[in-house]
Every structure is written in structure tokens, then in C-alpha cells.
């Protein structure tokens, strides 16, 4: 369908007619959370995990005398072109926060049989109205996530309705509820992509993280059912203290045995209620950078990424704006109770779509959120490697209870990574990890030790 806002801005034509390019650049769409911005928060396919193993990384090819683009190149070019325009291109909808697993690192999972939570969730009719409104406003990409999306008995109806609106739909699932019937349904109505999380190469490791006996085999069954039907499937993991010893084996199984794409991320966040419990299994910064150094593909992609996105985030508003990512510019999020925000991880004020329309929320509420000013200048404000860091008001609020407080963990990871990969870091204020800072020499010694261990 052709949507009014895209018609008016001419973006729909651009979306359907990608330009030429000479080669593929790092980075794909992947997580719809990041389709609006290469500088998004946790789930940022570009900055944290999926940037380092892009789907559809095909180079430009010639066909019938015409040069064509792989999806990743087109998507990146498209988002760069519309970077300064405010259109809700990319949406994330949490269908539920209930889940049949109890993953120790998860930021939002609730018990599957939580009746109070179930009663608070949007009805099918409410979702359909919202889908009507977001597609009319210009949404192209939509992520259905959870919780576990297949817990909703009306999932197939919701998915079918969204698909009829012309949306490119990605699905995040743990795979345990995929049956032959579900797989057949998805094969008949193909989504844009499906991402399944796997947490170990062995049953013991996977189930130590999920907390549910039998979940490993059920996830593998779901993967097999989808793979047999040729669906666009990506497997991913969160690396933590409980499974770091099996990352290589997981990658080998996924890429060599299953022939699928594998991604991993180690940037674990607190829960959205600000509980710090997931951080108990988070790797230390030096352990995260060690994962980079042992994978030549990963290190080369980080270097290419930083070469493509040097310096602070591109201008999207006033210099003193609190939010400088794409959240609320081309991206939005809706939680299971119909609360609209700029990011699924945001814990601040939201807009109730049960009491107003999406257009009202986008044009008034989220516009006001974007208009918020920073109260202070920090070392993050002009940081040249912020794209590698992921620091944003959401992470500040979750980890420090202050959206403007720099998160030391993120800062240390980014500077360690830059030092290890010889990526220059321009001066950006009083930063203890930059040259002359009180932690700079200790960081350099850590990097030297990591390189020596790698060799």
C-alpha cells in the first residue's frame, strides 16, 4: 500500500527504487529496532552484534545491464538519505512480555501464566487499529517481539493482518512453540526475517540459562522446521558467563552444520524495572573485546563500521538534544499494553494508544520527547566512538538511574575495543579512558595482555 506521509515526502519511491553503489558496507537492517538509525540502543544490529555478521551481505551485481543492490546496501543508503526527516519508518511491537522460558539475562520476561499481565495486553481489535494507523503514518518495517510471540493464541491473525498492510515483518522468537503447522503457515506467508535465540551448544548450558528442562530440544526442533521450509532464519545468542565457553561451538554448529547465519552480542542490560540482576552474568569489558580479537571477520567489520560512521551521531536536531539516535525520528516502540515510546527499553513517560491515536502520539508526544534538552555536557556528548558504545538515555536510565549519566561499562568496552583495533579516538572532554586520563595506561596494558593471549 502507498501511505500518505511517504507519498508526500517522496520516500516511498526511494524505498522501492534503491540507488547504485559500488560495494557493500557494513550493516544491515536486521533488528527493526535499528532500521531507523545506526546508532540505536541494545538490540542495535549495527552497533553491537548484527553489524558484525550482516545478513544479505551481497555486493552490487550486474543483471541484464543494470546494476542492482543487495538489501543491506540499499537499506543503509535509504536510511542515510532520510536520516534528517521525521517519518515513522520502523516500528517494534511487543505482543506480550509473557514467556515460556525464564532466561537469566532477559530484560522483560514475565511468567507465561501471569493472568494480570495477560488482561493488560491489547486485544486483537486494538492491535488492528494500531496497525492501520502506523501503516497510514508511513511505517515500512515492523518487528513483532516479546516475551514469546507465539504465546498469543491470535498470533497468526495479527501477523496476517499486519502483512496485508504491506509491512515488512521480522519476528523474534525462542523457537520452542514452532510446530509443523506454524512452520507451514509462515512458509505460506513469508516474513521478512525470523531470529531465534540459542544459548548453548549443549543442552546443559542452554537450559541453565533458560531455566526450563527440554527447551533446548524444542528450540532445535523449531529451527529445523523453519530451516526445512527455506524461511529467512538467523540464529543468535547473548554471550555471558554461563555460555562463553561454547560460543565457538555454537557458531560452528549454526554456520557449518545448519548453514545459517550466526550472530552474538555480549551487551547485557538491566531489566526494564531497573533490576540489576542480569548484570550478574554479564562479561567484563576485557572479555567482550577478547571475543572480537579472536574473530578476524568481527574485527574487520568493526574497523569498517567505524570508518563508515566516524565521529558523534549525525545531526538530527538541536545540539543540546537529549536524544541523538533515531529513536522517535524514524523509529517507535509499542508495548503490550499499548504504550507508545521511542524505544522498547525506555522506562520513562509513554503515550497511551488506548486513549489516543498513533498520529497524535507521534506528532505530539514523541515530538516533545525529542525536544527534551540535555541538562549537562558529558564526555559522551562529543565522543567520536559513540557508535561503538551504544550509550544513550535509555542505557543511562537503566544502569545509572539517570538518562544523562555515562555508563562506565559501555565506555570501557568502546575504548578497549578502539585501542585493540587501532581505531583513533579524538579528544571529547574529561574521559578517563582517553590519552592522559587516569585509566588510560591501565587500559593499554589490558589491551597488550589481550593481544598476547590471542597470539
Image: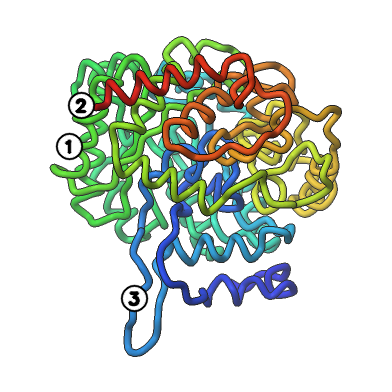
Residue plotted at (51% across, 20% down): 110
Q: Quadrant of the N terminus?
A: bottom right
Q: Where residue 46 sits: x, y (%)?
A: 49, 45
Reading the image, the residue beneath label 2 is 201
| Nearer-the-camera pick, 233 or 281 | 281
| Nearer-the-camera pick, 58 or 135 | 58
Q: Is residue 324 left or right of residue 263?
A: right
Residue plotted at (51% across, 10% down): 277
Q: Residues within 10 Å of mark 2 (few under 14, many from 20)?
A: many
Q: Is residue 427 left or right of residue 150?
A: right
SS for tag 2? loop
Reading the image, the residue beneath label 3 is 61
Q: Residues within 10 Å of mark 1 (few under 14, many from 20)?
A: some
Q: Nearer the viewer, mark 2 or mark 3?
A: 3
Q: Is residue 130 left or right of residue 73?
A: right
The mark nearer the N terminus, 2 or 3, is: 3
Query: What distance separates the C-alpha of mark 1 from that of mark 2?
Result: 8 Å
Contact (CB < 8 A) between labels 1 and 2? yes
Q: Quadrant of residue 377?
A: top right
Whether residue 445 is situated above or below residue 48 in the rendered picture: above
Q: How many marks?
A: 3
| Nearer-the-camera pick, 322 or 184 | 322
Amino acid at each position: 500500500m502507498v501511505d500518505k506521509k511517504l507519498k508526500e515526502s517522496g520516500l516511498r519511491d526511494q524505498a522501492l527504487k534503491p540507488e547504485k553503489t559500488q560495494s557493500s558496507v557494513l550493516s544491515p537492517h536486521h533488528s527493526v529496532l535499528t532500521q531507523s538509525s545506526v546508532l540505536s540502543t541494545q538490540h542495535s544490529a549495527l552497533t553491537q552484534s548484527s553489524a558484525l555478521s550482516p545478513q544479505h551481505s551481497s555486493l552490487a551485481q550486474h543483471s541484464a545491464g543494470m546494476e542492482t543492490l543487495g538489501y543491506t546496501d540499499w537499506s543503509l543508503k535509504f536510511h542515510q538519505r532520510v536520516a534528517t526527516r521525521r517519518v515513522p519508518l520502523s516500528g517494534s511491537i511487543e505482543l506480550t512480555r509473557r514467556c515460556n522460558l525464564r532466561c537469566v539475562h532477559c530484560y522483560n520476561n514475565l511468567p507465561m501464566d501471569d493472568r494480570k499481565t495477560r488482561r493488560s495486553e491489547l486485544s486483537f481489535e486494538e492491535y488492528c487499529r494500531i496497525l492501520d494507523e502506523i501503516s497510514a503514518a508511513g511505517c515500512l518495517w515492523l518487528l513483532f517481539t516479546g516475551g514469546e510471540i507465539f504465546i498469543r493464541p491470535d498470533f497468526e491473525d495479527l501477523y496476517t493482518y499486519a502483512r496485508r498492510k504491506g509491512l515488512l515483518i521480522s519476528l523474534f522468537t525462542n523457537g520452542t512453540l514452532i510446530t509443523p503447522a506454524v512452520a507451514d503457515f509462515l512458509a505460506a506467508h513469508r516474513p521478512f526475517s525470523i531470529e531465534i535465540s540459542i544459548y548453548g551448544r549443549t543442552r546443559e548450558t542452554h537450559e541453565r540459562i533458560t531455566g526450563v528442562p527440554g527447551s533446548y530440544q524444542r528450540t532445535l526442533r523449531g529451527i529445523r522446521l523453519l530451516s526445512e521450509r527455506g524461511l529467512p532464519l538467523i540464529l543468535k545468542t547473548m554471550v555471558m558467563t554461563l555460555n562463553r565457553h561454547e560460543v565457538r561451538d555454537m557458531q560452528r554448529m549454526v554456520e557449518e552444520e545448519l548453514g545459517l547465519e550466526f550472530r552474538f552480542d555480549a551487551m547485557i542490560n538491566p531489566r526494564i524495572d531497573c533490576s540489576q540482576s542480569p548484570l550478574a552474568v554479564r562479561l567484563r569489558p576485557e572479555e567482550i573485546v577478547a571475543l572480537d580479537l579472536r574473530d578476524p571477520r568481527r574485527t574487520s567489520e568493526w574497523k569498517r563500521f567505524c570508518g563508515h560512521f566516524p565521529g558523534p551521531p549525525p545531526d538530527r536536531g538541536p545540539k543540546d538534544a537529549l536524544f541523538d539516535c533515531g529513536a522517535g525520528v524514524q523509529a517507535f516502540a509499542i508495548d503490550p499494553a499499548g504504550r507508545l515510546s521511542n524505544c522498547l527499553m525506555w522506562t520513562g513517560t509513554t503515550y497511551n494508544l488506548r486513549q489516543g491515536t498513533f498520529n497524535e502520539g507521534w506528532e505530539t508526544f514523541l515530538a516533545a520527547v525529542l525536544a527534551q534538552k540535555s541538562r549537562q555536557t558529558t564526555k559522551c556528548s562529543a565522543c567520536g566512538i559513540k557508535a561503538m558504545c551504544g550509550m544513550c538515555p535509555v542505557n543511562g536510565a537503566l544502569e545509572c538511574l539517570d538518562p544523562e549519566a555515562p555508563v562506565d561499562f559501555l565506555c570501557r568496552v568502546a575504548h578497549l575495543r578502539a585501542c585493540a583495533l587501532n581505531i583513533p579516538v579524538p579528544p571529547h572532554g574529561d574521559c578517563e579512558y582517553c590519552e592522559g586520563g587516569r585509566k588510560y595506561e591501565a587500559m593499554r596494558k589490558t589491551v597488550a595482555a589481550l593481544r598476547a593471549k590471542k597470539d
